[in-house]
Amino acid sequence: MKLIVTDTAVECFRKDWGYREGDFVRIYVRYSGGGEDAFAFGITRDDPRYPAISNDFGGITFFIEENDLWHLDGRDLTLDCRYDEIAFVRG
């Protein structure tokens, strides 16, 4: 499992969300309702407690806590910026 954040996404986090070098971005699992997949990824500014995956992209540290790894199901996760929105791409 790898966590990848594209340069376009880093720029979106900086310009649209106000993140700066040295900040931490937690990627977590949240309940999103019914349907095919009732869970989705979310993002928040947070300090790591039990990070399972942690990588620095453009001076910003992105991480996923151990208790949220199950939603990856062994796959990689790429954060991208598409149509001015953060996109979570599992693959």
Image (spheres, rainbow, N blue to C red):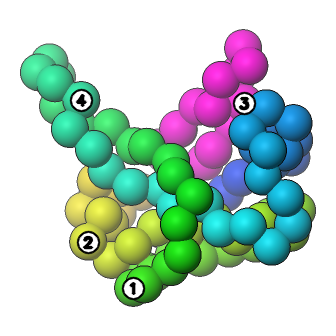
Q: In front: 61, or 72?
A: 61
Pointer 1: residues within 10 angstroms few (<14), some, or many (20+)?
Answer: few
Vertically, is 42 above or below 83? below
Q: Which residue is mark 2?
A: 67
Q: Secondary structure at mark 3?
A: strand
Distance in Å between CA atoms under marks 1 and 4 = 24 Å
Q: Quadrant of residue 70?
A: bottom left
Please, what is the three-letter code of the amino acid marked with disc 4?
A: Ser
Give the labeled residue for mark 3. 81
Q: Is residue 83 left or right of residue 47?
A: right
Q: Contact, CB < 8 Å: mark 1 with mark 2?
A: yes
Please count the marks in the image: 4
Q: Nearer the viewer, residue 63 or 24?
A: 24
Mark 3–mark 1 distance (CA, rounded to whole Å): 27 Å
Residue pointed to by mark 1: 50
Question: What x and y, as percent, mark residue 34?
Answer: 11, 21
Checking the image for residue 32, the label placed there is: 4
Kindly identify which numbered label has been placed on residue 24: none
Amino acid type at mark 2: Asn
Drawn side of residue 78 relative to residue 5, left or right: left
Mark 2 or 4, nearer chain start: 4
First to last magenta residue range: 77-91
